[in-house]
Image (spheres, grey):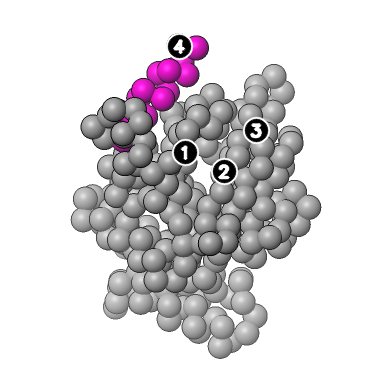
Amino acid sequence: MENVLEVKELTKQYSKVLAVDKVSFEIKKGEIFALIGPNGAGKTSTIRMISTLLTPTAGDAIVGGHSAVKEPEKVRECITYLPDEAGAYKNMTGIKYLRFMAGLFFSDLDAINKAVDRAKEMCGLGDRLEDKIGTYSRGMIRKLLLARAVMTKPKLAILDEPTSGLDVINAIEIRKMIKKLAAEEGISFLLSSHNMLEIEFVSDRVGIITKGHLMVTGKSDELKQRYEAANLEEVFERVVFKNEVH
């Protein structure tokens, strides 16, 4: 199966701080890969380099066959990035917001309409799309934003804390949406989350990063067996602690 993303020794130096040190991994078509680690581990810098928001000090990320360093504009056509702090225009209705965002990506009216129809179906907000976003709950906004992020059928969707602050029901719906998009439409996902239960449920493979180093990658069950752990939280703790004491 083809690789949608190939991260090749990505490195980011901030003055005297080496935030990311030769990180390498790949994501296949339709695969959900979770990059997890403690605060300050280098997750966000890695994601931003892949998203072309940061220029690597060294290394590269190849997305859909395009270099993030040499062809950032081509990479942006292949990806969507939904940061944790993402918001929407509160004075717009949901449907106008979707149409506005689709218009930024497509110039063809038919393509815009198809993207909006797709987003309407995915978000499941029904008649509430006619209401202003300022009246939405956090869960409704997150569903709207996720639908907006994937309505263009990106090769790679990068989601930072996709269910942060959501109640259990809304979080479950978002996770199911992600899994369905990967399985049925072949969209690849790069996730970052502090919720280990979420990571175990939704991801195909996991990478644990700490102090700028990608320490281990693998399926959750494989990692639990390797580290003799009952759950992914224990794996995380043991990998990070081992790095902290060395």
Q: CA distance from mark 2 to mark 4?
A: 25 Å
Name which residue type carries label 1: Thr
Q: CA distance from mark 1 to mark 3?
A: 14 Å
Question: Which mark is drawn over residue 25?
Answer: 2
Main secondary structure of the magenta stretch = helix
Name which residue type carries label 2: Phe
Q: Is residue 36 left or right of residue 129?
A: right
Where is mark 4, residue-wise? 245
Mark found first going from the N terminus, 2 or 4: 2
Mark found first going from the N terminus, 4 or 3: 3
Q: How far across and how far down the image is residue 165, in percent?
A: 31, 45
Residue 239 lies within the magenta run: yes
Question: Which mark is drawn over residue 217?
Answer: 1
Q: Are marks 4 and 3 in contact (CB under 8 Å)?
A: no
Name which residue type carries label 4: Val
Q: Nearer the viewer, residue 106 or 51?
A: 51
Graded by Cα atoms within 10 Å as few (under 14), some (14 to 19) or many (20 or more), the crowding at tag 2 reads some
